[in-house]
Amino acid sequence: MTNPSQSLIIKMVSRTLATFIQVFGIYVIIHGHYSPGGGFQGGALLAAGILLIRMTEGREESQPTLATAIATPLASLGAVIFAGLGVVILFFGGNYMDYGAVPVPGMEVPVVRYYGILIVEVGIGLAVMTGLVSIFDDMVRTNRQSGPDMGRGGMS
Amino acid sequence: MNWVLEIFLDILLLTTAIVALQAKDLMTSAVATAAFGFTVALLFISMGAIDVGFTEAVVGAGIVGVFFVAAIYRTTRKTKD
């Protein structure tokens, strides 16, 4: 977890597999309106890809994929996208999260609602992905001051 | 045909649950819990709840297993009882 894995096979397989997991996660997010899945499932799949890299490459080497410092701000950004788009609708005279109320020129009401739900799904996916990665980073954090029984797990 | 699959999944469900409870090595318990989650997901899908089964497969078999491994990494690997 904190140290990179020694096995070449594990590294190569996880690097290849994480790519396909994340592509499938993006597919699930953008097809969430009319098929099983949605923001939460796609975000959890994206987080699974990042956590696979975190577990095999080690915590320090996997920072370029998603840095620990920006995980929590991105989760907050996802929550703001989710709730803020509903508030924006209020200024156009519609109900909260009634995306069809926004008058976009050249678009029918169902099309506007379609894109509104898509933006909300992207926000949910962002919040879930960075939230799960942030939980994992907090769980494997090496804190020298506290935790007298650190490292007794016998794992690398 | 469907009830044969469901009985097989039920037997697998009981087996993974008993293995997860009785194992002395906590890593075995974590992997058995992930297998339990995936079997539950297959049962949900066989009952027609595609969305619930998908969520259970992603969360129960993927994320929860990773979190259990991270928790075992912070503590000891063997059980006392």
Image: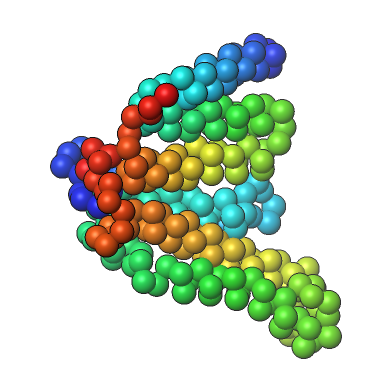
Say whether residue A22 is left or right of residue A13. right
Q: Position of residue A45 (x, y in %)?
A: 48, 50
Q: A117 or B29: nearer the eye?
A: B29
Q: Position of residue A11 (x, y in %)?
A: 23, 44
> Which of the 4 image quarters holds residue A70?
bottom left
Q: Position of residue A129 (x, y in %)?
A: 48, 59
Q: B7 or A151: nearer the eye?
A: A151
Q: Which residue is located at x 45 percent, y 57 percent?
A: A135
Say whether residue A36 is left or right of residue A63. right
Q: Which residue is located at x 55 percent, y 32 percent?
A: B37
Say whether residue A148 is left or right of residue A94. left
How many numbered discs? Answer: 0
Q: Which residue is located at x 39 percent, y 44 percent?
A: B71
Colour scheme used in the picture? rainbow
- Quadrant housing the C terminus of chain A: top left
Q: Looking at the image, is A94 positioned above or below residue B49?
A: below
Q: Looking at the image, is B30 positioned above or below residue A40?
A: above
- Let me know if residue A148 appears in the view: yes
Say whether residue B59 is left or right of residue B24. right
Q: A95 or A33: nearer the eye?
A: A95
Q: Looking at the image, is B18 positioned above or below residue A106?
A: above
Q: Position of residue B58 (x, y in %)?
A: 53, 43
- Let me know if residue B66 appears in the view: no
Q: Which residue is located at x 34 percent, y 67 percent?
A: A67
